[in-house]
Amino acid sequence: MDCYDTALRYALDRRQFGRPIAGFQLQQKKLAEFITEITKAQLLAWRLGVLKNADKASPAQISMAKRNNVHMALEIARESRQILGGMGIVGDFPMMRHAANLESVITYEGTHDVHLLITGNDITGLNAFE
């Protein structure tokens, strides 16, 4: 959300060719995709929370959500940096810090591929770890 909020504020404030860059199609496409993916990830996390509270969330469901939500957040961190152009890599904005933190989450939360194999095992019933 921080990357999305920062990109949105920047796009509304930054003017190019006499108007905010938020008025350009490519920027609106990116912002619309960001909020759509964030909302989907939030709904997934909320639903898993409801299932967990009812003792019905499976480890495979949790693994799938972790993989999806970390991947989504990393993609938004990377893409939102592009809205800021060269300013996206300076310390004044959070995109690079979030991207670096998310890269580490891919490792310490269980690798992206391991979560994928857990999901594959869940849907096929075949253990690829053997």
Image (cartoon, rainbow, N blue to C red):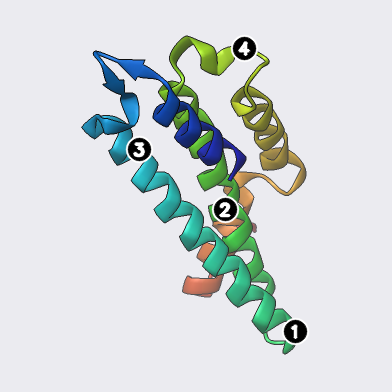
Please, what is the three-letter code of the amino acid marked with disc 3?
Lys
Disc 4 and disc 1: Cα gap in Å? Answer: 41 Å
Q: Tell which circle, 3 or 1, labels the residue nearer the N-terminal end.
A: 3
Callout 3: SS: helix
Disc 3 and disc 1: Cα gap in Å? Answer: 34 Å
Callout 1: SS: helix
Q: Tell which circle, 1 or 2, labels the residue nearer the N-terminal end.
A: 1
Please, what is the three-letter code of the amino acid marked with disc 1?
Asn
Disc 3 and disc 2: Cα gap in Å? Answer: 17 Å
The percent coordinates of residue 1 (x first, y second) are 58, 46
Which residue position is annotated with label 1? 53
Which residue position is annotated with label 3? 30
Label 2: how many Cα within 10 Å (few below 14, some 14–19, many 20+): some
Pointer 3 with pointer 1, Cβ within 8 A = no
Mark closer to the observer (2, 4): 4
Q: Tell which circle, 4 or 1, labels the residue nearer the N-terminal end.
A: 1
Residue positioned 72% across, 89% down in the render: 54
Which residue position is annotated with label 2? 69
